[in-house]
Image (cartoon, rainbow, N blue to C red):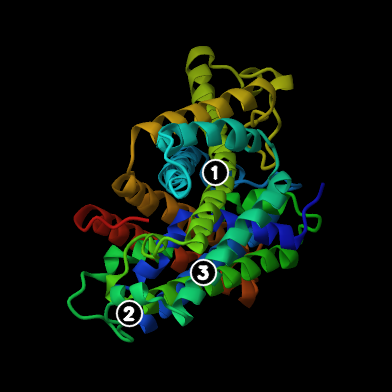
Amino acid sequence: MSSSVSSGVATLLHTACGAGILAMPYGFRTLGLTFGVIALGFCSLCAMTGLLLQAQVARYVPGRTVSFFELTQLIHPKLSIVFDLAIAIKCFGVGVSYMIVVGDLIPQVFATFTSKKILLERNFHITMVMLFLVSPLCFMKKLTSLRKASLVALSSVVYLCCLVLIHFFWPSKEIHQRRGKVFIGFPHNEPTPLTTLPIFVFAYTCHHNAFSVYNEQKDISTRQLNKIGRYGMSIAFVLYTIIGGAGYLTFGDHITGNIIALYPPSLSTTIGRVAIVLLVMLAFPLQCHPARNSINNVLYSFQKVEKNQREHTEDSNLIPEEETVESQTGGPPVPPLQGRRFTVITLIILIASYLLAISVTSLARLLAIVGSTGSTSISFILPGIFGYWLIGSEYTPEELPRTLKFAKLAGLLLTIWGVIVMIASLAASILYGASH
């Protein structure tokens, strides 16, 4: 079934709004209210630019098969392994962090009405969620199939917005006592903004699912695809501004990395924890989908190299014709992600995620490093490179229309900005312990 603009927007919003939304108010701590909103707006604009560039370059791949892999074949095929590895590692790491959040929050929910040991055990809840809820969703082959799950998850974000606003406008006595100093401008005696800037940068990362959303649209014209990027990032900016700004104004410089943990125990807070669990639980399949595609591409690339070295035959003889699908860009054939291959790769992702989630209680530093490299590559560097090299490639430099010149310049600037953000965020992650 073809997807609409609204379901495409919901999917991208669900991909972007993960567990990091809990840390959004903390991002204001080192920037203050004014510059925090400005930073959110600028990051939203950069993320929107990346999505608009992806909508532009999608037309260079015929049909509905556009992907990072296909586009890489047009500019430098050997880079496809590097790009796909970045996507796979980033999505896998974020997916594991979601399961860690599940293991942290569900026992707190059950602790409000039971003292049974097994129901307070984090590994028990991770096992149940992975087995009966996450796994079935991960075996769905199209993002269109997850549109209802995305709507449920976005309802959780709306509830969190309401919870933050209610506690801001009608704070309890205990919240009043926890409130610190609020800074409208830059705060004093705070660490460098680089410690929290990655929270804003990575909050809009949904670009790894953009091409899948575009491929499933009923209307794949550039004008229609542009609406998805504009609407999605605009709504995300509003949601983040409400949660981040109101949360910071509530607690000031006493804000921590998980705002819901600061609220006194109550029915509304418990429902909030349940809402966050729903959000991250239903977001896991949206990380599994691009990770699975990228792993498939990487495995095929290694398989192709190995057979080239062993057989030295033509590409058409490397893999039987019935096991491949010809690339729409004229590059090497791409193995179809179906049947046993689809099942095996999905099971590997699920099992590896489960084992890591029950073994590690905190991936903050690892996720910060992976996010600094993977998220900036996916959101800024890759869309920028593709936009700069492909947009207007059918024209000579003299014939290139002004609008396409502007788009190419935007791609170049976005790439440069992505490299700067990667270096700065990675340095902050290593030196200051910043994390998503």
Residue 382 in percent (x, y) is at: 49, 54
Residue nearest the observer in this picture, 319 or 397: 319
Q: Which mark is residue 284?
A: 1
Image height of 321 relative to 84, above or below: above
Quadrant of the rendering where the C terminus is positioned: bottom left
To which residue does mark 3 refer?
A: 163
Left or right: 414 as drawn, with respect to 236: left
- Label 1 vs label 3: CA separation? 24 Å
Closer to us: mark 3 or mark 2? Answer: 3
Q: Secondary structure at mark 1?
A: helix
Residue nearest the observer in this picture, 89 or 116: 116
- Label 1 vs label 2: CA separation? 32 Å
Figure quadrant of residue 425: bottom left
- Label 3 vs label 2: CA separation? 22 Å
Residue nearest the observer in this picture, 9 or 353: 353
Residue located 45% across and 57% down the image = 381
Residue 387 visible in the snapshot:
yes
Residue nearest the observer in this picture, 323 or 150: 150
Kindly indicate whether the residue at mark 3 contacts the one at mark 1 (C-beta within 8 angstroms).
Answer: no
To which residue does mark 2 refer?
A: 32
Residue 262 in percent (x, y) is at: 36, 64
